[in-house]
Amino acid sequence: FGPKMSKMALKALADEEADALNRRNTNKNEADSKKSNGPVMRLSSNTVDCLGCNFEEARRKCEDKFSKVMMSKNNVVFILHGHGTQGVLKQKIRDWLKRDKQWVESARPADASDGGDALTRVELKKIQF
C-alpha cells in the first residue's frame, strides 16, 4: 500500500487536488463562454415581423424585441421586412442597423435556410452584468 501519510498530509493533498479541479473547471467555463453558441434557428420567439410597417414602427418593434431577447441567453434576432416596394423598408432597416451602436454587434441578410434576403439576421451586443 505504500508509505502511510499523516492526516495533515492527506488533507493538504486533498485540498491541492480540489484546487486543481476548480482551476480546470474555471478554465473550461471561460473557454465555453468564448465559443459561439453555434447556429441559431429562426423561431417566432426571436423574429420581429415588420411586414406592413413604416420605418418608425419597425424600429420601435425591433428595439422592443432587442430588449426582450437580450435578457435571454440568445443574442440573435431576425427581422422580417420582406422585399417590399423597391426594398425601401429593408434598406432603411439595414442602414439603421449599420449605424446603431446601442444594440447591434453585427447585421447581415439571413441565410437561405432562415428565409433569405427577406429577413435580416442581427447579432446583439452581449450585456455585461
Image (cartoon, helix red, strand yellow):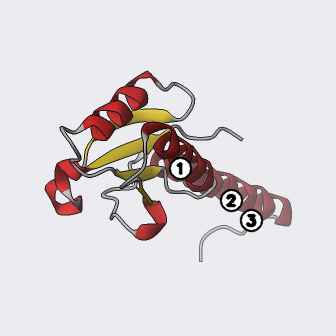
**Dot 2 or dot 3, earlier in sequence:** 3
72 shown above or below 109:
below
Indicate left or right for 112 with 60 as reference. left
Q: Secondary structure at mark 3?
A: loop
Viewer-proximal residue, 89 or 107? 89
Instruction: Bin the neighbour count of mark 3 within 10 Å (Cα to Cα): few under 14, some 14-19, many 20 and up.
Output: few
The residue carrying mark 1 is 61
Disc 3 to disc 1, C-alpha distance: 67 Å
Res 5 label: 3
| Residue at the bottom extreme of this rendering | 1
Whether residue 122 sits left or right of residue 14 in the image: it is: left
On screen, residue 123 above or below 92? below
Task: Name the quadrant containing residue 39.
Answer: bottom left
Most foreground residue, 114 or 19: 114
| Residue pictured at 21% horizontal, 59% vertical | 115
Of the residues under marks 3 and 1, which one precedes in the sequence?
3
> The residue under label 3 is which amino acid type?
Met
The amino acid marked with disc number 1 is: Lys
Q: Residue 9: horizontal and vertical position, in percent?
A: 78, 58
Task: Kindly indicate whether the residue at mark 1 contacts the one at mark 3 (C-beta within 8 angstroms).
Answer: no
* Residue 102 in the image, given as x and y percentages of width and height: 57, 29
- Residue pictured at 28% horizontal, 33% vertical: 91
- Image location of residue 82, percent across then percent down: 26, 52
Examine the rendered structure and indicate whether residue 30 appears above or below residue 44: above
Which residue is denoted by mark 2 in the rendering? 18
Q: Nearer the viewer, mark 3 or mark 1?
A: 1
Quadrant housing the C terminus: top right
Going by the numbered disc 2, the residue's amino acid type is Ala
Task: Give the CA separation, mark 2 to mark 1.
Answer: 49 Å
Q: Which comes before the other along the chain, label 2 or label 1?
A: 2
* Residue that protrudes farthest toward the top in the picture: 99
